[in-house]
Amino acid sequence: MKKSHHAIFINLKSNFVLLPRQVSVLTLPDHTSIIHHVLIDGLEPETKYYYRCGDSSVPAMSEEISFVTLPLPSKDSYPQRIGFVGDLGLTSNTTTTIDHLMDNDPSLVVIVGDLTYANQYRTTGGKGASCFSCSFPDAPIRETYQPRWDAWGRFMEPLTSKVPTMVIEGNHEIEPQASGVTFKSYSERFAVPATESGSNSNFYYSFDAGGVHFVMLGAYVDYNQTGAQYAWLKEDLSEVDRGVTPWLVATMHPPWYNSYSSHYQEFECMRQEMEELLYQHRVDVIFAGHVHAYERMNRIYNYTLDPCGAVYITIGDGGNIEKVDVDFADDPGKCPSPGDNVPEIGGSCPLNFTSGPAKGKFCWDRQPDWSAFRESSFGHGILEVMNSTHALWRWHRNQDVYKDDSYGDQIYIVRQPNLCISPATSREAGGGRETSGGENRFSSPSLPIFIWIFLVFGIL
Ligand SMILES: [Fe+2]
């Protein structure tokens, strides 16, 4: 996008309050952009709105586009289909993934990090590298390339201009620059309701979509129990009213449970810091990416099968240039060394198992009991929340696009609030909502619904 001094505006058919939220000039090597974010107040839930976006002073308005707002927080209303996708990049596989995702008509999309892979574009020439650091060991400080970010935005526009899309940052968004600048391209492009959710950082936040409360966790900022993110998470979870938002879903970029060799136990430090808090609050499902393959875990807590633990799902198989991950840590000769997988930011806490078939060892010698299903194919997932206790999860592989109603994995995720009672969720198990205290900040009807439309629009 070339630099322009004209204001971008959104023209809705009715009168709404348009609040300029942020106008930033993004200056990075070889490129300057002006990026506009607008907050639209006063929208009704579950309502279709039509809008045009652009600059009316020059012939540069978009087509008329529509989106549907999400339902208000309620145990009786849910987004019809929530799409999950991660580690996208911009390849022919990405194209299939996004086409397939749009065919499945999501009402909300959650991207679990690693969006554009623009940080590798120049070095690789846009070609695939299954292991970037192996193929380019002498690559200088990780690059950034704004035309690639903008190309990705234009590629995603048919989806993101029509469907509310929420994001969490991945390691490919770090893009370290001079003077310690990180996440610049990502942060300037993607607005998130951090302030609205009581967070003082755009790297972690929460939001409601009908009866689902999402907590979006940052793996590349401080996650320790002494830090600001943990304090925010504790506060946020304590304010969730499961009588209003029965479903609690967490996302982060790297998985805590992962039986692939790639990124094996890479974020064990984060798990050790945060898992207990999520378990106490009976988080139902935890989505991650980072590993470029699919894996669904049985309910687990602290590496022990537990009916009240979360269902962990790795959905980092969006189709990026680094190829799909195929090696399992339990394959002969494929167990990484404890020092092999170290996060770009944060420490390393390799763990030898203390019980079970892999006791005393770093890797299992067969598919671990906690790994329910795994497959190295590109794809995306759709979560259909039926009611306060049942949700249907389907993993749609790219190869399934050629067959009607075909999928690679399917499971009903069933909540058992009366079995999995904890002090943190006792209100729901007790069958009623407390009238004093614990008011969910998002359930207030005086607050607007936040819909984020990520529209990249070129001014010629
Ligand atoms: Fe990643």
Image (tube, helix red, strand yellow):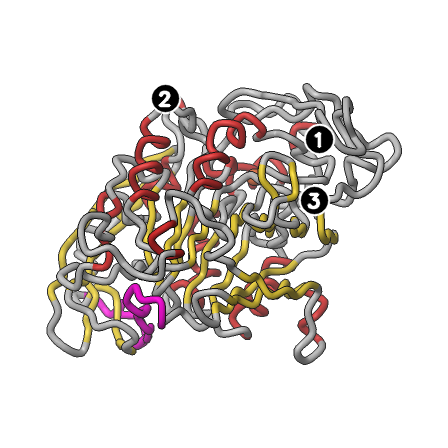
Q: Position of residue 33 (x, y in %)?
A: 30, 45
Q: Amino acid at mark 2?
A: Thr
Residue 365: quadrant of the picture: top right
Q: Amino acid at mark 1?
A: Ser
Q: Secondary structure at mark 3?
A: loop
Where does label 2 land, which residue? 226
Specify whether residue 272 is painted magenta.
no
Q: Is residue 278 above or below residue 158?
A: above
Quarter assignment of residue 291: top right
Instruction: Return the x and y of residue 302 as percentages of the image width and height.
Output: 59, 34
x, y percent for residue 168: 43, 45
Q: Position of residue 295 (x, y in %)?
A: 67, 50
Q: Earlier in the sequence, mark 3 or mark 2?
A: 2
Among the two numbered marks 1 and 3 on one chain, the one whose residue lies closer to the N terminus: 1
Which numbered tag is attached to residue 370?
A: 3
Predominant secondary structure in magenta?
Answer: loop
Disc 1 secondary structure class = helix
From where the camera sits, is residue 337 visible? yes
In the image, the segment drawn in magenta is 58-76
Q: Nearer the viewer, residue 312 or 241?
A: 241
